[in-house]
Image (cartoon, rainbow, N blue to C red):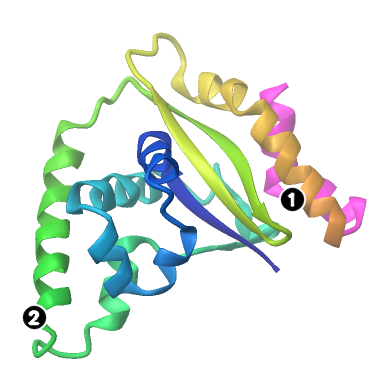
Amino acid sequence: MNRFRIIPKEVHDAMVALRIEYSIFSNPYEMIKVLSTSDLALIQLAYDNVTSNFFPVVQVGSLEDSPITMLKKEINDDSDHVLYDVYRELTGLVDGLRFKQDNNSVDVYTLYPVNGDFWVVLQQRLHNVEGDLDKRKLKENEQFFDELISIALRTQSFEEVFKSSLFTSYLKAI
């Protein structure tokens, strides 16, 4: 089963420069030790901006948990003050960033292979986009759809892929 993690390009570039491994996302304590709350907030926004209609990875694999979801799952009670405090700070920061978000922007996605079944989806935001945002979003992500369809065809028949919303989105993009 393919797994996908969404990371904004600027956070990914910093992770690469600092030689931070993707394995930090498997442990919330490691994640909050290595990444700043601002980085986690940008990652959370990238997850929040993805819609199931536009990013149908469920047909190709599974989307890894977002930072807030990871923290929620790990906090069993209020006795874990470290995770709870980071969770509260992160949700507040994300709410503030959402309020400041540019409504005339389009997210462009690029797949970055990590290993055979794990992919990082780099999200880059184009600001001050004019015209029909939905059409522009589809057109900007044409290569992304190509790559997702290629991945889907490794495990599914052409007929299954052809009937999917992924293929429909792809056709709209070309």
Which of the two labelled residues, at mark 2 and mark 1, occupies the earlier sequence position? Answer: 2
Q: Name the secondary structure under disc 1.
A: loop
> What secondary structure characterizes most of the magenta part?
helix
- 159 vs 72, left or right, is right
Give the amino acid type for the residue marked by disc 1 in the picture.
Answer: Ser
The location of residue 84, given as percent across then percent down, is 13, 75
Q: Residue at x 15, y 90 (%)?
A: 77
Residue pointed to by mark 2: 81
Q: Which residues are magenta?
A: 156-174
- Does the magenta segment cover residue 167? yes
Which residue has dot 1 on it?
164
Q: Residue at x 90, y 52 (%)?
A: 159
Q: Could you tell me which secondary element the residue under label 2 belongs to?
A: helix
Q: Quadrant of the N terminus?
A: bottom right
User: Is residue 151 rendered to the left or right of residue 122?
Assistant: right
Query: Which image quadrant is residue 82 in?
Result: bottom left
Q: Position of residue 140 (x, y in %)?
A: 57, 22
Q: Is residue 163 visible?
A: no
Disc 2 crowd rating (10 Å Cα; few below 14, some 14-19, many 20+) is: few
Mark 2 to mark 1: distance in Å? 44 Å
Instruction: State the residue at coordinates (34%, 18%).
Output: 127
Q: Reply yes or no: does residue 117 show up in magenta.
A: no
